Amino acid sequence: MNTISVAAVETANTKSTRKPLRLTKFKPALILLPFALLFFMFQIAPMLWVLFNSFIYEDEFSLENYQEIFDSAFILQGFSNSLWLAVTSSLIAIIIAALFVSSLRRFDSRARDLIVSFTNMTANFSGVPLAFAFIIILGFNGALTLLLKKYGIIDDFNLYGQWGLLAIYIYFQVPLATLLLYPAFDALSDDWQAASSLLGANNWQFWRYIGLPVLSPALLGTFIILIANAMGAYASIYALTSGNYNVITVRIASLVSGDIFLEPNLAAAISVLLILLLAFITLINQLLISRSYHAKR
């Protein structure tokens, strides 16, 4: 009888301990449930809605919206203009940011913190205020434009054309690239460069064989983030050009908010192609990053 009672007590204890263990196991999932619900409501559900409506043409399931995109030279020009601005501004911004962060490592900690704080503030200066600031400084009658014309440095500068838009894209890309690259450059040890110089390597050889291979994952990842940031830019370019310059975000907005040419299904199809384009670029980036990690091993 004693043996049976002891066994019964042990089974009761194991059952009582299993319940708290199960609750403890699922507690993180319960905490994450509200965040997962918000993520589904504001990320997954709109994406599914856009995907579904991209195949709706005149209340029928069709590929006509995609056919219209590839037949429209105007929409394809919007893609090409957006890609050109995104890739060019990202390349220039990442070069400027890399040189800036490399020099920033030589500052003392107090000055470095002040510069990083200012860069963080600059990264959040975008949209309509940024466009207004550029109009005041580099517009047709902007302060800097008139000053450069006065001294004969430039004949004219069109802020509202391709090169003017590239300037504003570079401006809001550089602070973001600086903030993203700063931790990667901060991980570089000065001892590595000292050791390479002791072995007879010059500064170029250090960056060619040590610095850039170590930084390549961060550089590639930052480059993709900058492209996505530029491809999705809307407020600054719309405030600057009033929608007169053909980029893909302006085309999407005109199709969902226009009074005459209201075609939300076509806008959904353009959005799907934009998502696929960014997904393809991200996939290429991941392949390059994986190769760079494999090379370092």
Image (cartoon, rainbow, N blue to C red):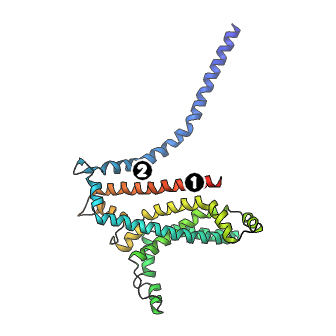
Residue ID for mark 1: 291
Farthest residue in the bottom direction?
151
- Relative to residue 248, is residue 226 drawn left or right? right
Whether residue 265 is visible, yes or no, is no
Up/down of 167 relative to 262, above or below? below
Up/down of 21 relative to 33, above or below? above
The amino acid at mark 2 is Phe
Q: Residue at x 34, y 57 (%)?
A: 270
Dividing the image into 4 quarters, which one contains the N terminus?
top right
Q: Residue at x 66, y 63 (%)?
A: 209
Up/down of 21 relative to 116, above or below? above
Whether residue 15 is visible, yes or no, is yes
| Residue 218 placement (x, y as % from top left) | 58, 60
**Among the 4 quarters of the image, the one containing residue 141:** bottom left
The amino acid at mark 1 is Arg
Mark 1 burial class by Cα count in 10 Å: few <14, some 14-19, many 20+: few
142 or 66: nearer the eye? 66
49 or 61: nearer the eye? 61
Numbered badge on residue 42: 2
| Residue 172 placement (x, y as % from top left) | 49, 69
| Residue 154 placement (x, y as % from top left) | 45, 88
Tell me the SS state at disc 1: helix
Among numbered discs 1 and 2, the one appearing first in the sequence: 2
- Relative to residue 63, is residue 199 drawn left or right? right
Farthest residue in the front direction?
200
